[in-house]
Amino acid sequence: MAKYTELAEDILKHVGGKENVNSLKHCVTRLRFDLKDESKADDDYLKNRDGVVTVVKAGGQYQVVIGNHVPDVYAEVLQVGGLPAGGSLDIDEGDAPKGNLFDRFVSLVSSIFQPFLGPLAAAGIIKGIVAVMAACGLSAATSPMYVILNAAGDGFFQFLPILIALTSARRFKVNEFTAIAIAGALVYPDIATMVTALQKTGQGHVLGVIPFALPAGGYLSTVMPSILAVWVASYIQKFFTKITPDVIKVFVVPFFTLLITVPLTFLVVGPVANTFSDGLTNLFQAIMNFSPIVFGLILGISWQVLVMFGMHWALVPLAILDVATNGSSIILSAAILPCFTQTGVLGAIMLKTKEESPYHLYASLHFIYFWGYRTCYLWGKPSNENAILHFMWCFRTYGGCHDGPRY
């Protein structure tokens, strides 16, 4: 990494120095600075500097595009700048996220999902391999390798709430291990059995009033409950950090954060997220009954955002009911075109991109798509390129209206 020392020093100098940096993280190809004052950064110098592809301002971030070796440059910037190992600096409480609401939304999605995009894509590809093995007649009953690869692919997604809790903790400034403990409670293996036993004995209420129940399938593979739980924990942790004496703060703050957040998550936060999901199901059902064309239009527009946060599962019960009733379903057909739209956009960018590093990135995403896994694409580059996102929205809208009359 020593070969990137000069580049790291130069980048840090021309973004206004380490004093101008609120926080720093990186994605697949970019250094993502949150600067106190972007006017102090020298855009022209950085754009023309060898080793820097270009500079992009998006999502409230000052992004220096490096290439696939960005982790090495990132580590060197941390070292020469004396930044904390986590890649972030303590910022004043008065500091607030920058940009309009859309930029803040993009920044939130980026900060939570991008850190684990690589393993996410790898697990998705493994799931594709398992699907091919199943198509060839292999199964858990006949192939040890099928069992192993199935665990490798599914394990990541089963415990996704823990990974999301980790990155959400960095976003909301919560102790990372406290956040992991919160998510660990959500996916605790025996929780579903215990809750069912309580309900059978008529003890399924806290204080005799508040219902204690889990959604079908529990909280495995969920997205929103973990994000909301860590967000709530950030306020609880901040409160107890202020009032707790330093001598006992190291264990008292996480103790009360867990003691309050975990019950709140099971009794309030989780049910709110599930209610929102159920509301989406009912809303789309009502829209479909009103007008299939309008249903296709709205589904086409909203599909990408729904997938980003795992809320697209709210539509699965509709499809299952349709299959149970009619033997087949085309309810989600309006969501098919977005997948092909994404592939088309990737191909177009690959053809037009002159820089080598972005080309390799988009080529990799294009390859991952053909293995049947697209979430990494949604959580990756397009969610940080507003023009591309708007372009895809237009074509998904057309696709939804086109497919709507088929329902």
Image: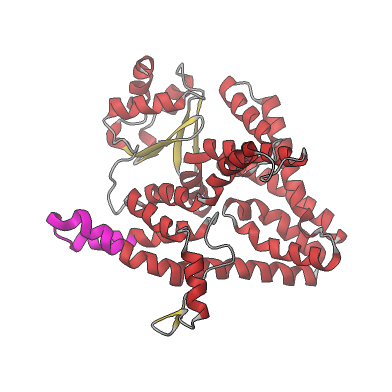
Name the colour scheme: secondary structure
Counting from the top left corner in percent of width and height, residue 359 is at: 62, 25
Left/right of residue 23 with respect to residue 54 in the rendered view: left
Percent across and percent down for residue 175 are 31, 51
Q: Position of residue 288 (x, y in %)?
A: 77, 67
Residue depicted at x 66% and y 45%: 140
Q: Is residue 246 magenta?
A: yes
Q: Nearer the viewer, residue 240 or 106?
A: 240
Q: Report the residue at 66% width, 41% height from top.
A: 373
Q: Is residue 126 above or below residue 43?
A: below
Between residues 254 and 291, which one lies in front from this camera angle?
A: 254
Give the extent of the magenta segment: 235-257
Q: From the viewer's perspective, is residue 88 above or below residue 4?
A: below
> Residue placed at 78% from the left, 60% from the top?
331
Q: Quadrant of residue 378?
A: top right
Q: Position of residue 272 (x, y in %)?
A: 51, 70
Quadrant where the N terminus lies?
top left
